[in-house]
Image: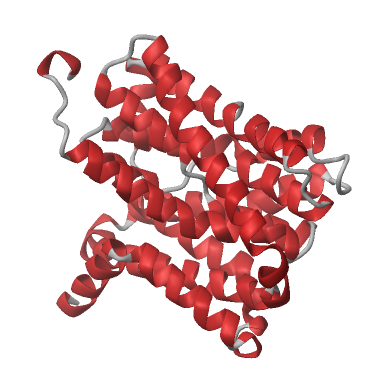
Amino acid sequence: MKILEKISVFSGKYFAVLVIIAAVIAFIFPSAFVGFGGYIPILLGGVMFGMGLTLKPIDFKLVFSRPLPVILGILGQYTIMPLGAFGLAYVMKLPPELAAGLVLLGSVPGGTASNVMVYLAKGNVALSVAMTSLSTMLAPLMTPLLLYLLAGQWLPVDPMAMFMSIIQVIILPILLGFLVQRFFPTAVAKSVTVVPLISVVAILIIVTAVTAANAANVVTSGVLVFVAVFLHNSLGLLLGYAVALIMKLDENDRRAISLEVGMQNSGLGVALATAHFSPLAALPSVWGAIWHNISGPILATIWANKPVAKKDVK
């Protein structure tokens, strides 16, 4: 178990590097990984089950004790990111599948990796966890609705089918993990340190599957998609911080909201794009899985070396 824990810590620390390596290998040898495409929903369900294992009722306490930062963060998550993706898709004149895929990336909830980034950035971790949890629980309603309103002009969107997909691959696994943790706390406590390793492996397999399916598209559209994802992520990080600053929130709240708004659950984006659109539409979420886990640590490192003033800490 100790060895697995060390591997888990290593994989979490160098996750971005591992994602890049996995994507490159899958690009060079696509035939070896394309078969994993059918397992993407199961793999994502495993990641969400791991999230449920670590979720506790206290994680939602902040929603009731200090609702303003949570509400602002969630509003930013479901306005800045989808509208930003919509605007970029228009300005950059992306092809229909890539445009819909970028809007999809902007319409999914925050990713769990953001919690770690907020911790490293010396931000408000409790706020980050509350935002991730609440935005994920709202995803069955918000993600299909936003896609229907913003991406329907590019590709047909079936909100009800997407709603059911999110319930199956996100909500049910989280609830199952939460129940296991509640009824078998001792067993979960002994194994929870290995959960990040399982999540990393699952996401790496997802990345290889979609990269393999898009081997030809990466050559023709890779740079264009990366630029779109880079601008989209930068917009989220910047405007998330700006909104919190305008509302006069503390610095550690600003950092949490910035990272939460900017970092998306790209795994869910990949799963939904693959199931409801096409492998090409999943490409923005694949780049998101790579870039978000590079930009997040960079920003977290900058902030970690810039202490929060005592008057800004509650």
Residue at (71% x, 51% y) in the render: 101
Between residues 102 and 90, which one lies in front from this camera angle? Answer: 90
Quarter residue 41 falls in: bottom right
For the point 48% across and 38% down, which residue is it? 234
Q: Eyeballing the image, is 237 above or below 296?
A: above
- Residue 186 location in percent, x, y? 22, 59
Q: Quadrant of the N terminus?
A: bottom left
- Residue 143's spot in the image, x, y percent? 67, 39
Q: Residue 6, relative to residue 69: is it above or below?
A: below
Relative to the observer, which residue lies in front, 84 or 263?
Answer: 84
Where is 75 relative to 214, above or below? above
Q: Residue furthest left?
A: 310
In the picture provided, is 152 more to the left or to the right than 193? right
Residue occupying the point 54% across, 31% down: 77
The quarter of the picture where the C terminus appears is top left
- Judged left or right of residue 69, residue 270 is right
Q: Position of residue 266 (x, y in %)?
A: 55, 53
> Where is residue 18, by image quadrant?
bottom left
Q: Position of residue 48 (x, y in %)?
A: 48, 56
Q: How is the image coloured?
A: secondary structure
Horizontal side, residue 39 vs residue 14: left or right: right
Q: How many marks?
A: 0
Judge whether 169 appears above or below 115 on screen.
below
Tell me, yes or no, if residue 284 can be seen here.
no
Please give the name of the residue rendered at 45% of the width and 70% of the height, measured from the top-left corner: 20
* Most foreground residue, 191 or 82: 82
Would residue 72 be seen by someone viewing this image from the given angle?
Answer: yes
